[in-house]
Image (spheres, grey):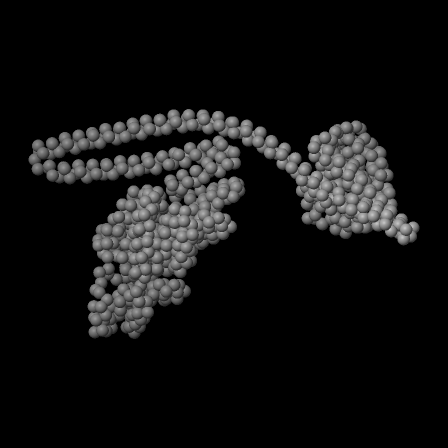
């Protein structure tokens, strides 16, 4: 997982305005009392720089007095330096707009005073503000400009800061190799100048890059050397950061007591020194520690504190990764929606500064979350996004984690070939980490050998005999070294061959298991499909019997009971009305029962198709006659438009049932006096017959029509005369059309009517 280290830009900026070794504050304060003019102003700037992190109010006072003195003297170079110091005070108080305004004034003074070096420090401070706004490319450009100026004027110390600043931006964006190159260059300059505190910073940065790349031995070496240097110069805050980083090494080695000891100790030291950034970093690492040992409540507390503290510094990549930890803690606690919310927020925050590494980690976390939900397509998509954002800086560890994830998700989705390929890649990457460590060891042996050879040569070059003996020893050592290398290479080849043979056997076994699983999965899928269809049929049947079939029975029984009990008190007209209601309920019940029986036969595949040559005009005429009585009650006219030559080869009874259901629906939803048209015609390609039922009724809402055509919905709507229905008729019609090898489509406009067309093959 991601490990973060952010250098204090304020300290870096101020260190290079004045010499590193300055007198104590007490002595400076005594000296400044007896000074005046330009000498006093310069001492005030040193006092401002030294007190800025401990007493910001005093730092402001010193910087403003220095600016006033330089202004009265007309010293533009001094004004620029004082303006820069005042801007850094604003920066430290997170007043970025005031800081930017002051820096722009100082920049103008530096130009007027022709002070190029101070101008360079001003634009690098502007770059720090711009970076916090997410404009990283512009920040890099300003740092590069400052670097060029400092190198031109021999300001190597400041130039090393620019290299480190550019390296930090690359590191925050996940570009590890360019960052490592810049940190090394900064270290070499500082080593040449003997700047121990700055050397320690550079070594710490180098260790962080090695950590992210998964080269933990190199990271530990860099951290250890950085800690010792910081100890010699009593850099308490630097030691806090490095203590955290060494704790991360112990966490990686799963030495949990040591890891917790380092993180807790760093947090305690940060509080003693009022080092807010150190507190944020310690809480962040404690969150990682508790996530690793699966104590999610504690992880959530520490991650939340770190995000709150980092937000105060506008450290976007730290905030992004803190949100990532909160998401993982919520996921561990079972709060999946909250977890997803924080992962997405982490991605949004990382986008501000184009932090690809943080985005890759967040997408990886989302992929694992969605795999746990069983949403494998989404999980795979997020996995690919994680891989894409890792880009060229993709570490061995991250690549291995992603391929292990791919293997699992492909296995769960039954894609065993890709699952095996991903697992093979994961195994190779995991093995490559061992090979990398072996390569690093071999390089170290070679370096040590060369150093020893040179030292022995220098000691033995006193006489010709001693030189000859030294050469012989060196040749022997070199030969032994070559023999060792040969044995190592041969051993590596033998080891790789053994792995290859094992993988071959494993591949064969996996292929056999994959074929067996494939057959079993196909059989299981077929059985599941059949079982699901049976359950759906059962559920639908019970639904209709429990609800739709009881309604007409209740109407029938209710009217019958009233007629039976009150017939002596009723007039003929009332008896006729109740008899009419009983007749309607009986017809509805008969119609429903027929549809229900037909539908159940369709669902259980017990319906038999008996095709014959049918003249469309005869079929439509018969259907119209069957519905004439129902249409006549509402005064609806049924017209026919059919060519006498249209014929179709199909099942007459099923086709009649289809058209009668469509016609009954049309009558139901057409107002009295309306018109319904039945038509039959050939399609444009003459291969299909189109049977259409069109009305000028009330029409159907688009969403309702879409639901009717695309789903198994069977809900019913009252007709224009409050006619009741079951909703089964249209569902049955669709399934019967499907049985005949045809399709059904519908069009409707509210207030204008509806049209349904059945398309069946001619033969």
Residue 244 is left or right of residue 297, and the answer is left
| Residue 16 location (% of width, % of height) | 28, 59
Q: Residue at x 14, y 37 (%)?
A: 456
Q: Using the rendered view, name the quadrant where residue 148 is placed.
A: bottom left
- Closer to the camera, 40 or 650? 650
| Residue 310 location (% of width, % of height) | 39, 57
Rendered view: 63 above or below 317: below
| Residue 52 location (% of width, % of height) | 31, 65
Q: Residue at x 45, y 54 (%)?
A: 349
Q: Residue at x 75, y 43 (%)?
A: 549
- Closer to the camera, 483 or 461? 483
Count of numbered labels shown in the rendering: 0
Residue 457 is left or right of residue 132, and the answer is left
Q: Residue at x 45, y 46 (%)?
A: 365
Rendered view: 464 above or below 111: above
- Closer to the camera, 222 or 329? 329
Q: Using the rendered view, name the quadrant where residue 99 is placed.
A: bottom left
Q: Quadrant of the C terminus?
A: top right
Q: Using the rendered view, name the quadrant where residue 663 is placed.
A: top right
| Residue 653 location (% of width, % of height) | 79, 33
Residue 673 makes an appearance in the image: no
Residue 1 makes an appearance in the image: yes
């Amino acid at each position: 997982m991601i490990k973060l280290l952010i250098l204090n830009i304020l300290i870096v900026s101020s260190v290079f305005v004045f010499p590193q070794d300055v007198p104590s504050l007490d002595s400076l304060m005594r000296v400044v009392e007896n000074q005046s003019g330009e000498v006093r102003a310069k001492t005030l700037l040193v006092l401002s720089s030294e007190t800025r992190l401990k007493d910001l109010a005093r730092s402001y006072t010193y910087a403003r007095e220095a600016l006033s003195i330089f202004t009265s003297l007309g010293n533009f170079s001094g004004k620029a330096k004082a303006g820069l110091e005042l801007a850094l005070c604003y920066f430290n108080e997170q007043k970025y707009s005031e800081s930017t305004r002051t820096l722009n004034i100082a920049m103008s003074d530096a130009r007027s005073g022709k002070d190029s070096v101070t101008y360079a420090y001003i634009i690098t401070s502007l770059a720090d503000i711009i970076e916090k706004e997410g404009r990283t490319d512009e920040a890099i450009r300003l740092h590069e400009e400052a670097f060029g100026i400092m190198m031109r004027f021999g300001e190597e110390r400041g130039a090393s800061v620019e290299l480190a600043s550019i390296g930090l931006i690359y590191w925050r964006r996940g570009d590890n190799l360019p960052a490592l190159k810049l940190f090394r260059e900064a270290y070499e300059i500082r080593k040449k100048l003997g700047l121990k505190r700055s050397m320690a910073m550079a070594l710490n940065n180098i260790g962080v890059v090695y950590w992210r790349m998964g080269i933990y031995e190199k990271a530990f070496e860099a951290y250890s050397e950085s800690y010792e240097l910081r100890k010699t110069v009593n850099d308490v805050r630097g030691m806090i950061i490095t203590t955290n980083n060494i704790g991360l090494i112990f966490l990686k080695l799963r030495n949990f007591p040591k890891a917790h000891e380092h993180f807790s100790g760093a947090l305690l030291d940060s509080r003693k020194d009022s080092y807010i950034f150190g507190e944020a970093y310690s809480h962040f690492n404690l969150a990682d520690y508790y996530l690793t040992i699966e104590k999610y409540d504690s992880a959530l507390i520490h991650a939340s504190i770190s995000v709150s503290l980092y937000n105060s510094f506008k450290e976007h990549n730290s905030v992004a990764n803190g949100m990532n930890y909160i998401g993982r803690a919520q996921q561990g606690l079972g709060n999946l929606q909250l977890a997803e919310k924080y992962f997405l927020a982490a991605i949004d925050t990382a986008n501000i500064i184009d932090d690809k590494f943080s985005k890759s980690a967040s997408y990886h976390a989302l992929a694992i979350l969605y795999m746990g939900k069983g949403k494998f397509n989404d999980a795979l998509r997020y996995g690919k996004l994680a891989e894409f954002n890792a880009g060229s800086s993709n570490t061995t560890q991250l690549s291995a984690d992603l391929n292990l994830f791919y293997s699992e998700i492909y296995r769960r989705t039954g894609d065993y070939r890709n699952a095996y390929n991903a697992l093979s890649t994961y195994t190779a990457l995991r093995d490559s980490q061992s090979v990398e460590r072996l390569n690093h060891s071999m390089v170290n042996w070679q370096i040590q050998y060369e150093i020893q050879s040179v030292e022995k040569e220098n000691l033995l070059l006193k006489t010709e005999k001693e030189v000859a003996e030294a050469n012989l020893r060196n040749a022997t050592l070199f030969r032994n070294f070559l023999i060792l290398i040969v044995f190592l290479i041969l051993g590596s080849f033998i080891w790789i061959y053994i792995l290859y043979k094992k993988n071959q056997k494993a591949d064969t076994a996996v292929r056999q298991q994959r074929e067996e699983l494939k057959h079993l999965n196909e059989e299981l899928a077929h059985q599941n499909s059949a079982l699901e269809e049976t359950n759906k049929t059962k559920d639908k049947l019970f639904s209709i019997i429990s609800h739709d079939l009881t309604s007409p029975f209740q109407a029938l029984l209710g009217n019958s009971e009233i007629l039976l009990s009150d017939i002596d008190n009723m007039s003929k007209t009332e008896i006729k009305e109740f008899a009419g209601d009983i007749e309607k309920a009986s017809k509805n019940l008969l119609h429903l029962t027929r549809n229900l029986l037909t539908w159940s036969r369709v669902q259980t595949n017990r319906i038999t198709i008996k095709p014959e040559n049918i003249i469309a005009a005869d079929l439509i005429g018969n259907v119209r006659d069957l519905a004439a009585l129902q249409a006549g009650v509402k005064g609806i006219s049924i017209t026919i438009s059919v060519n006498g030559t249209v014929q179709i080869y199909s099942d007459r009874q099923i086709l009649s049932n289809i058209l009668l259901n469509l016609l009954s629906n049309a009558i139901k939803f057409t107002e009295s006096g309306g018109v319904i048209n039945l038509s039959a015609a050939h399609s444009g390609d003459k291969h299909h017959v189109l049977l259409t039922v069109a009305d000028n009724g009330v029409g159907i809402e688009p969403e309702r029509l879409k639901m009717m055509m695309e789903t198994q919905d069977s809900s019913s709507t009252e007709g224009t005369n409050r006619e009741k229905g079951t909703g089964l008729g249209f569902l049955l019609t669709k399934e019967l059309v499907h049985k005949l090898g045809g399709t059904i489509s519908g069009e409707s406009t509210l207030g204008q009517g509806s049209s349904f067309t059945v398309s069946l093959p001619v033969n």
